[in-house]
């Protein structure tokens, strides 16, 4: 009888050990490889809706400062003094010239094709052209009428070292109170 009790106890301890290791692996994955962020505004609609959760890939930005591709949705720190994270789309890369004319965005003189926009032909800026410095990117929200992006944020450009992650996918979550 003692033998079977000891055997059950041993099996239970093995099972608990397995759960602990699994939880530890999930924790490590979500703190170093992935991150979760809620999008509290409409600035990225229709691509990412208000109050949706996005799952982001952090690994490449933890290991270095890679330059994201144009069109990539990134999560970045608004500035080094604030912890607030913003979610926007990369429009301009280092060395690019970004221009605005008649509601359209131009990169190095060529009109960008932007099928993800909430409304076509509403992109505007007080400045007609931006030159993206080395080590920085230029970002815009997909909802150009309601986005705090490179046209309006202090410093205009997002330093590549401020990029926290790239968006992988989103999960609809509603009725979240902030």
Image (tube, rainbow, N blue to C red):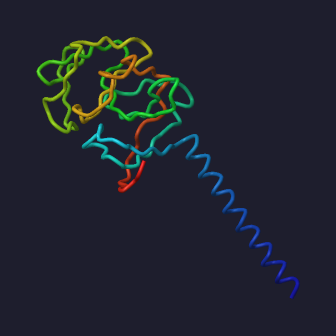
As displayed, is residue 124 above or below residue 144? above
Q: Which residue extends farthest right?
A: 2
**Count of numbered circles in the view:** 0
Seen at 51% across and 37% down, the residue is 58
Q: Give the quarter of the image for residue 1.
A: bottom right
Q: Residue 75: x and y, percent?
A: 43, 34
Q: Is residue 78 left or right of residue 59?
A: left
As displayed, is residue 55 above or below residue 83? below
Q: Is residue 111 left or right of residue 24?
A: left
Q: Residue 172: x and y, percent?
A: 35, 54
Seen at 16% across and 36% down, the residue is 119
Seen at 19% across and 14% down, the residue is 109
Q: Is residue 46 left or right of residue 51?
A: left
Towards the viewer: 35 or 152? 152
Q: Residue 24: x and y, percent?
A: 65, 52
Q: Which residue extends farthest front?
A: 178
Seen at 36% across and 49% down, the residue is 51
Towards the viewer: 95 or 129? 129
Q: Give the quarter of the image for residue 6.
A: bottom right
Q: Which residue extends farthest bottom?
A: 1
């Amino acid at each position: 009888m003692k033998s079977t009790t000891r055997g059950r106890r041993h099996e239970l301890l093995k099972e608990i050990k397995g759960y602990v290791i699994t939880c530890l692996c999930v924790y490590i994955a979500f703190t170093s490889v992935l991150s979760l962020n809620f999008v509290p505004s409409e600035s990225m609609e229709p691509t990412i809706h208000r109050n949706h959760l996005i799952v982001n890939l952090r690994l490449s930005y933890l290991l270095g400062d890679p330059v994201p591709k144009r069109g990539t949705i990134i999560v970045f720190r608004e500035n080094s003094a604030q912890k607030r994270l913003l979610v926007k789309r990369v429009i301009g890369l280092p060395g690019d010239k970004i221009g605005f004319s008649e509601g359209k965005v131009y990169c190095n003189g060529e009109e960008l094709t932007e099928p993800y926009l909430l409304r076509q032909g509403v992109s505007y800026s007080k400045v007609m052209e931006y030159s993206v410095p080395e080590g920085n990117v230029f970002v815009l929200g997909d909802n150009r009428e309601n986005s705090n992006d490179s046209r309006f944020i202090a410093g205009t450009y997002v330093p590549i070292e401020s990029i926290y992650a790239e968006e992988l996918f989103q999960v609809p979550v509603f009725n979240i109170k902030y």
